[in-house]
Image (spheres, rainbow, N blue to C red):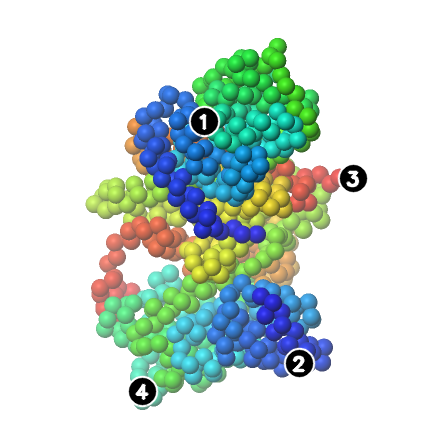
Amino acid sequence: MSGMRDRVAALLSAHDPATTGRLEFLRARFDAGLAWVHFPVGLGGLGAPRDAQQEVDLALAEAGAPDNSPRRIGIGLGMAAPTILAHGTEEQRLRFLRPLWTGEEVWCQLFSEPGAGSDLAALGTRARRDGDDWVVTGQKVWTSSAHNAQWAILLARTDPDVPKHAGITYFVCDMTAPGVEVRPLRQITGEAEFNEVFLTGVRVPDAHRIGEVGAGWRIAQTTLMNERVAIGGRPVPREGGMVGVVADTWRAHPERRTPELHDRLLSLWVESEALRLAGIRLRQQLAAGSPGPEGSAMKLGFARLSQALSALEVEFLAEDGLRYDDWTQRRPTAVDFTARDAGYRYLRAKGNSIEGGTSEVLRNIIAERVLGLPTEPRSDKDIPWKDLPR
Amino acid sequence: MNLLYTEVEDELRASVADLLGDRASPASVLAQIDNGADTALWRDLARIGATSLHVPEHLGGQGASYRETAVVAEELGRSVAPVPFLGSAILATAILTHLADDPAARELLTRLAQGETTAALVVPLSSWGPTAGGYKARSVADAAAAEVLLVPVEGTVHLVEARHAVVTPVTSLDQTRPIADVDISGAPTTPLTGPGDEAVHAALVAGAGILASEQVGVARWCLDATVAHIKARYQFGRPVGSFQALKHRVADLWQSIVLATAAARHAADALATGVDVDIAVSVAQSLCSAVAVRAAEECVQLHGGIGMTWEHPAHLYLKRAKADEIALGTPGRHRATLAPLVDLPLQSTP
């Protein structure tokens, strides 16, 4: 890995973070292959093992280099990029990945619909071919970042006459195109982090199709698997994330401690530490080239723990737990589950077991794909999408 | 920190699993349940080196580490073979390794490592934290089969020939781990030089850390057996494993075993390297104890009526899991140990 250190040093000497503009530095970092080292050369990477990234990030942070605000562009980094890399054309990779990584272009995800949540494959947004374009009409929902996004990854139905999984195609959609309307969707926290997106006759060039026509469902699996790893599998130090916030609250208030809360906190601390270790194990498996199915375990554990920890914190805070910081409809541009006050964290955590696949769907996936249990009998599998009851 | 299994560890697992598969399948363990420790199997485990992996070569062992020993513990948990692994190969061996400056300790350690004899640490198996020791102890693991007893008394560890002590086997909840009450009053003893309290502490920590891997093995067997059963069992015209009510329960169990595996590997790695040992061991014990018990309880429940029968081996795992939960500190005691180590005290120190 000393090669990495040399490359970092070369980047820093050619582009001193103290005197280089933020965007200029990020572009240079991408071009040096130090953006995501496991990506191919020429696309921000070096074809290196994934775990070499941590050393690069650490060295650059120590040198005071700017980062690409990963919380602001999480959907691009965690979902769009791995999908474009795996299934896009070389032209698409070269066009999209660099500004995606530098944060010049923010991405969102147009997957879920009012009538297609856990049963995502039932989605009804239609894309009809018209010359070199596709014309897209439909409604999407739960779209974080849509109000800041230049681009979206989009699933749309291109063939309603075949069973639901077979008639879906994967596109990249320009969020500034005519016919795209973004409306805030207010949540239980009071803020509007998500949106409804209405698509009315939106023209998407065929050059922005990812993969074959009708291959959208298979390609979406890449996105969804990466989403789950992105949500649950970030490398964190001991007491990183929600457990650290709650532990600090505990330390700050000796007068509120009770034996019952103490044992609950320690149980959750232990589980958080084990989840962190399982994440390290998962990354070691990825680096060793033998990815395990632990990714879905990470997301399931993360959701449960952030809910239990934030719930404990509100209870622990007693009279302060009765208060809420602010119910006004904010429009955040970055997602931070540990932000604001305990009440916000408690309410926001409720989304963790819903977004990116509900915990119930994840349990089905684990049971069927990891443990090999049979699926529930399904009545909709071989019926053309247009004939499904709805 | 490596939390994976190395190739060498995978090979070791395969050879231990082969031996146990031949000689200690759950059905054969059940058939011989009244016979106490399986000494023939123990000798064969010693012959392939599986009982002294973490003992240095110059003391007669294999010169590997607790990482490899933990893999053996996992397989022994999976088979619930009645062998004195925890009592002799872990607890007694750890004490003697700590006191290896004493010639008598060294001599016994070599004999243990070569599988010539077995020894037991005379404290209740439930011990955790500062342990006073004494001439009498109840519920001592693997004492009935032991030829030599290691008895901590007021800061010194004494070596006592078992034939001079009163060792009374008692009926064990865990049928595959025999326990006995021990009384050495009036027996001739050889006091071992060296810090006895420290040696006992080190043995309990090593025991608790390795026990976590055994618990992972217990839990994995329970999950595997349960999944196999609900795939094969038909009710209402379909495998019961196709019902989400059951699928979600085994998915949650699998998820908790993923966490337990990471925690147990971390504890074994910490014991091998000496880094972060106390936190790693108590995290692993707090979690793996509970996961093994839940796995065994789910195994009984999801097998339905057959899970409640004597002829199905699920009960051996339930008994092992429940006894392991008490062994070397309950989850609650390990959390109490953790509290000051991770700066989460109940009361602030003035």
- Nearer to us of marks 2 and 4 is 2
Earlier residue among tags 3 and 1: 1
Would residue A376 appear left or right of B143 to someone viewing this image?
left
Q: Amino acid at mark 3?
A: Pro
Read off the residue under disc 2. Answer: A14
Question: How far apart in space, not on screen, are marks 2 and 3 (Cα)?
Answer: 53 Å
Q: Amino acid at mark 1?
A: Arg
Q: Position of residue B66 (x, y in %)?
A: 54, 41
Q: Quadrant of residue B301?
A: top left
Residue B98 visible somewhere in the drawing: yes
Q: Position of residue A316 (x, y in %)?
A: 63, 46
Query: Tag 1: Cα neighbours inside 10 Å, few (<14), some, or many (≥20)?
Result: many
Chain under numbered label 4: A
Q: At 63% from the left edge and 82% from the top edge, which residue is drawn? A: A24
Residues marked 1 and 2 touching at CB (< 8 Å): no
Question: How far apart in space, not on screen, are marks 1 and 4 (Cα)?
Answer: 74 Å
Read off the residue under disc 4. Answer: A130
Read off the residue under disc 1. Answer: B177
- Nearer to us of marks 1 and 4 is 1
Query: Tag 3: Cα neighbours inside 10 Å, few (<14), some, or many (≥20)?
Result: few
SS category of the residue bearing label 1 = loop
Question: How far apart in space, not on screen, are marks 2 and 4 (Cα)?
Answer: 48 Å
